[in-house]
Image (spheres, coloured by chain):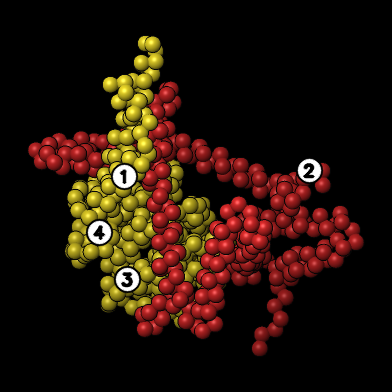
Chain colours: A red, B yellow
Amino acid sequence: MSGLDLSFGKVALFLCFGLLPIAGFLLGLRAPSIRRQGPIILAFLAGIIPILSIYIPKRFLAHPEMGMSPRLDQYLIIVAGFALPLGIVNVIQNSSRKAIRRETGWPFAVVLLVGLFVMGSFGIYGAWTGEGIGFRVDGTSTPFKWMEENCFKPLQSTIFALLAFFMASAAFRAFRARNAEATILLVAGVLVMMGRVPLLEFIATPFPPLMPAAAAASQWLGKLTEWIMDVPNSAAQSGIIIGAALGAAAMAIRVILGIERSYLGLGKGD
Amino acid sequence: MAGLLDKLLKIDRRWIFFFVALSVTVPILVPLGLPISTTSATQMAFDFVEALEPGDVVLLSFDYGPSSAPENDPMAEGFMRHCLSRDLRVVVCVLYPLGALGLANNVVARIGHEFPNKVYGTDYVNLGYKDGDRAVMRRLGDSIADAFPTDVNGRPIADLPIFHGVRSIRQVKVVFTAATGLIGEWWITLVHAQFGTPVIIGPTAVSAPKYYAYISSGQLAGMLGGMKGAAEYEQLIGKKYPVLGNYYKGTRLFTAVKGMDAQTAIHFVIIVFILIGNVAFFASRLRQGRS
């Protein structure tokens, strides 16, 4: 029989993310300033522990099973799971209010709620009966799987497929060489569109004697496209990615240090 | 002439929709079999898998939904067929919430059926969906069993022979993520950067340009960019493994190679409309300048 695990990392995590929030909540009932400080302290701890575990590879911080940082990752999976019910509650609240008040587009809110409850019920039914949400042992579909295959997938595919029509229409209306920058974008875009597919072979299909020339030109166009993607595109993307990463790091530091509080719904003066 | 140009500029968009519909449906109904050249990013991915030893463990992550399935499904299927042909052990997982689990279940069932000599739990396994994307990736770095205690059927993964000698993502030889959105990028920035596991990505064509930067920096072992990348991969594995080549030639199911005909036709239509739009635009500007 194993005894109670009282390793330092586990106890420290329990204190930080178990007792501290409860104490903060109880004290906050009487002192609103503590109520505001509690989440900021929690965010600081949740942010600083994984960073420390990288630079201080001590057992209580970084051990795969006992360490605070890996355990915190486990907590994160659980917390992420709780975000789903939160989203469902939010959808039910907003959509039911819209439907009851007969606001603009209320029939769509009703469809959303019906979809949510029907799919949710079939999912719960699958879990309750032990059938799951996939195929049954005999190969037939569970109600959830049937709805997924025959409603959800076709609907999502259809919505996305509509983009092709709107993109073509938008390209015709907006892709114009109005100035130098737009011309560069237009030329590069058309070259990449031509180089990514065997377009010249497609055009030469009705004229077989032209096919070898089309194939050679297509190969050259393909190389040009690869160069555009590998060099100018890659350089620009690297700049964007590095810039975004630095921005994310700066924002993370602001949250950890409690400078950025908008996620709490607090303004600068609060 | 001026009247015609004005008409072109004000063309009813339903005509554009009509030509788009025509260019997608006709090549699917009457395949053209256009040739497809191989890009270096796809060749890198193929060569990387070819260099692995039989018995090595690879992870295939379904990070896309039905909206991009025509692009991503052929990638995931091609990769899984390639790995099973090479006797690699394939671990499948799902991190995308909107319908990816259903797609993964279908692909695993279909390909498992194509390889009757491969045993579920020994040669391939489906771990199912886990919420928390980045947290799950971080957890995989310490222990796969902590992130996915059971497979999709609820069987403890400790009981599955496929995981013998594999504790964490560090022992996995490569991660292939068929991805839409940001999840693919997290495999690079979290799993590759922190645990050193090589990553091959199969993004949708619209996301592909971003990943060229990761290829240039050596952080990606290869990429199948959009349907074109999937079609290239199908051709490469079809040439190397005659059984797969015969499958791709004979199947009545959708493949990326078949999809490329439609994509070529629609690119042609869009380019023609862009050219018409620009010719009409310049002609009308010229006319305005003269008047």
User: Alpha carbon of mark 1 to alpha carbon of mark 3: how far?
Assistant: 35 Å
Circle 3 packing at 10 Å, graded few (<14), some (14-19), many (20+), is few
User: Which residue type carries mark 3?
Assistant: Arg
Quadrant of the snapshot with the C terminus of chain B: top left
In the rendered structure, which amino acid carries the disc numbered 1?
Phe
Image spot of residue B204 (x, y percent): 40, 51
Which circle marks residue B18 in the picture? 1
Residue at the disc numbered 3:
B110
Say which chain tag 2 marks. Answer: A
Q: Disc 1 versus disc 4: distance between alpha carbons?
A: 36 Å
Q: Nearer the viewer, mark 1 or mark 2?
A: 1
- Secondary element at image label 2: loop
**How far across and how far down the image is residue A162, in percent?**
40, 50
Q: Secondary structure at mark 4?
A: helix
In percent of width and height, residue B8 lies at: 33, 30
Q: Residue at x 20, y 53 (%)?
A: B31
In the image, what residue occupies the spot 63% across and 67% down? A85
Please tell me which residue lies in front, A130 or B152. Answer: A130
- Label annotation for residue A268: 2
Residue bearing the label numbered 4: B237
